[in-house]
Amino acid sequence: MKKILFLISLFIAGTLAANLPGEKTASPVSGTLNAPAMTISLTGSVLDKETGESLAGARIQIIETGDEIFTDILGNFTIAAPASGAYTLKVSYISYQEQELTCKPEKNVEERVISLLPL
């Protein structure tokens, strides 16, 4: 019984270790290693343009990658964005005008304050 539990533990540990984020993985077709995509950390906050109040739960999407995140209770967010080339941020919140911003990273950490207008 101990041998079976040990083998199951080894299998689970191997499976978890093989799927760690940011690790290089072998391509199933060619067997070559795929390097992880280069990203920067995009941080910021979403505010009401008229009152300056934070908007908790605002949705931030990166159109090119399909990644999305929601602001925290203070209206702040952090998301990984492409490190090269331009990308488009789509910011939306209930009862506010949606906004699209074209961004081009200039450093490893970008910070944005995004203000939305109520409808």
Image (tube, rainbow, N blue to C red):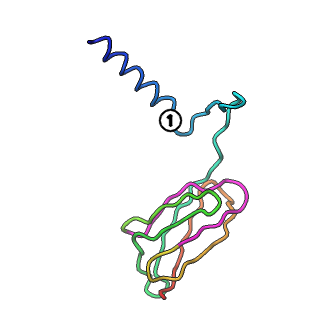
Side of 45 where 72 appears, left or right: left
- Residue 113 against residue 11 in the figure, above or below: below
x and y percent of residue 87 in the render? 67, 63
x and y percent of residue 86 in the render? 71, 62
**Residue 16 figure quarter:** top left
Q: Which residues are magenta?
A: 74-91
x and y percent of residue 59 in the render? 48, 68
Side of 8 where 63 appears, left or right: right
- Residue 76 against residue 36 in the figure, above or below: below
Instruction: Give the main secondary structure, helix, strand or loop, of the magenta stretch.
Output: strand
Which residue shows up at 49% across the image and 84% down it?
49
Which residue shows up at 66% across the image and 57% down it?
107
Under tag 1, what secondary structure?
A: loop
Q: Residues within 10 Å of mark 1 (few under 14, many from 20)?
A: few
Number of numbered tags placed on the structure image: 1
Residue that badge 1 annotates: 20
- Which quadrant, please, contains the N terminus? top left
